[in-house]
C-alpha cells in the first residue's frame, strides 16, 4: 500500500513539474481542456455517492425503529457495527447498495426489513490547494466550489503567483490521472469565466510561481545571498527544471 501511494505521489509530482514548465513541448501529458473537467465535475452530483471510511451514517428501519442507528461511523476498515449485524462492509458501496445488504441480513429477523441509509457527514469531500497561495491546504467541497473560490478559501493568490497557468489535477472515475491548465487572468478580467472550473473531491489545485518571482529568487540567491552548498547552484531545483528566458518573463 505504501509503495503504491509513493508511486502515485511521484506521478502527480511529474505532472505538476511538466505542466508548470513554460515550454509547450515540455508537457508530460497533453492537458485536457478546462471545459472537460468542468463538465465532469458538474455531472458528478448526479452520480450516487460512494460511502468512504470516516463518513457517518444514519441507519433507519422504517417499521422497526428500535433498530435505528444514528451517526454511525464507518470504521477505518470500511465496516460498520449494527445490533444484529456487527461487521458489515459499507465503504465502497452506495447508500442504496448498503440498504439492500442490510435488508438481506435482517430478513431472517424482521418481517419487513425496510432500511434507509443516509450519509450524515462526508469525510472525503475535499480538494487540496498548493503552491503560491496564502495558506496551502484542504478545502471543503460541501458547497459548490470553483478554482477561484478554493484559492480564496486558502488565503488568495500571492504576489508571486503565476495567474496564467494554474494547474488542476484529477483522477477520473477509472482512477487515471487527468490534468488541465486554467488562466485565472481571464476570470479576473471577466473575459472567460469558463476558466473557473468546478472542483471535485480529491482534486489538486497547484498555483506555480511566476517568472518574475523566479527572477527575484535568482537575484536573492546569486547576488544578495552567499552561495552555500551544491543546491544553491540551482535556485529552482525544488520544482522548476527549465532555465529562465527573458521572453518568458510574466504571469
Image (tube, rainbow, N blue to C red):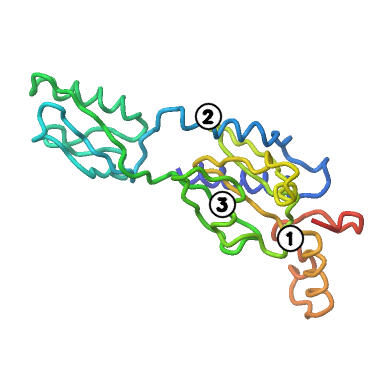
The residue labelled by disc 1 is 237
Label 1 packing within 10 angstroms: few (<14), some (14-19), many (20+): few
Point out the tag, 2 or 1, that comes first from the N-terminus.
2
Residue 62 locus on image (x, y percent): 15, 27
The residue labelled by disc 2 is 43
Q: Is residue 187 above or below residue 178?
A: below
> Residue 26 falls in which quadrant of the image?
top right
Residue placed most toward the observer, 87 or 139:
139
Is residue 158 visible in this depiction of the protein?
yes
Point out the tag, 3 or 2, that comes first from the N-terminus.
2
Label 2 packing within 10 angstroms: few (<14), some (14-19), many (20+): few
Q: Secondary structure at mark 1?
A: loop
> Residue 19 falls in which quadrant of the image?
top right
Q: Is residue 186 left or right of residue 76?
A: right
Point out the tag, 1 or 3, that comes first from the N-terminus.
3
Residue 217 locus on image (x, y percent): 77, 69
Quadrant of the snapshot with the C terminus: bottom right
Q: Residue reaching furthest right?
A: 247
Q: Secondary structure at mark 3?
A: helix
Q: How many marks?
A: 3
Amino acid at each position: 500500500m505504501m509503495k503504491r501511494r509513493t508511486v502515485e505521489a511521484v506521478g502527480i509530482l511529474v505532472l505538476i513539474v511538466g505542466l508548470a514548465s513554460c515550454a509547450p513541448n515540455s508537457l508530460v501529458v497533453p492537458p485536457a481542456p478546462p471545459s472537460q473537467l468542468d463538465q465532469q465535475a458538474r455531472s458528478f452530483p448526479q452520480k450516487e455517492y460512494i460511502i468512504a471510511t470516516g463518513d457517518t451514517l444514519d441507519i433507519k428501519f422504517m417499521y422497526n425503529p428500535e433498530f435505528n442507528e444514528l451517526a454511525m461511523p464507518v470504521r477505518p476498515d470500511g465496516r460498520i457495527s449494527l445490533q444484529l449485524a456487527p461487521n458489515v462492509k459499507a465503504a465502497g458501496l452506495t447508500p442504496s447498495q448498503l440498504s439492500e445488504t442490510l435488508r438481506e441480513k435482517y430478513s431472517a429477523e424482521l418481517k419487513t426489513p425496510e432500511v434507509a441509509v443516509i450519509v450524515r457527514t462526508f469525510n472525503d469531500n475535499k480538494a487540496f490547494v498548493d503552491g503560491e497561495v496564502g495558506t496551502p491546504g484542504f478545502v471543503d467541497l460541501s458547497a459548490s466550489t470553483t478554482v477561484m473560490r478554493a484559492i480564496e478559501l486558502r488565503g488568495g493568490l500571492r504576489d508571486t503567483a503565476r495567474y496564467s497557468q494554474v494547474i488542476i489535477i484529477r483522477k477520473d472515475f477509472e482512477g487515471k490521472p487527468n490534468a488541465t491548465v486554467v488562466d485565472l487572468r481571464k476570470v479576473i478580467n471577466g473575459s472567460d469565466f469558463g476558466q473557473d472550473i468546478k472542483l471535485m473531491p480529491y482534486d489538486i489545485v497547484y498555483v506555480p510561481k511566476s517568472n518574475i518571482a523566479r527572477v527575484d529568487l535568482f537575484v536573492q540567491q546569486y547576488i544578495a545571498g552567499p552561495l552555500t552548498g551544491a543546491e544553491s547552484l540551482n535556485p529552482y531545483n525544488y520544482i522548476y527544471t527549465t532555465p529562465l528566458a527573458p521572453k518568458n518573463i510574466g504571469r
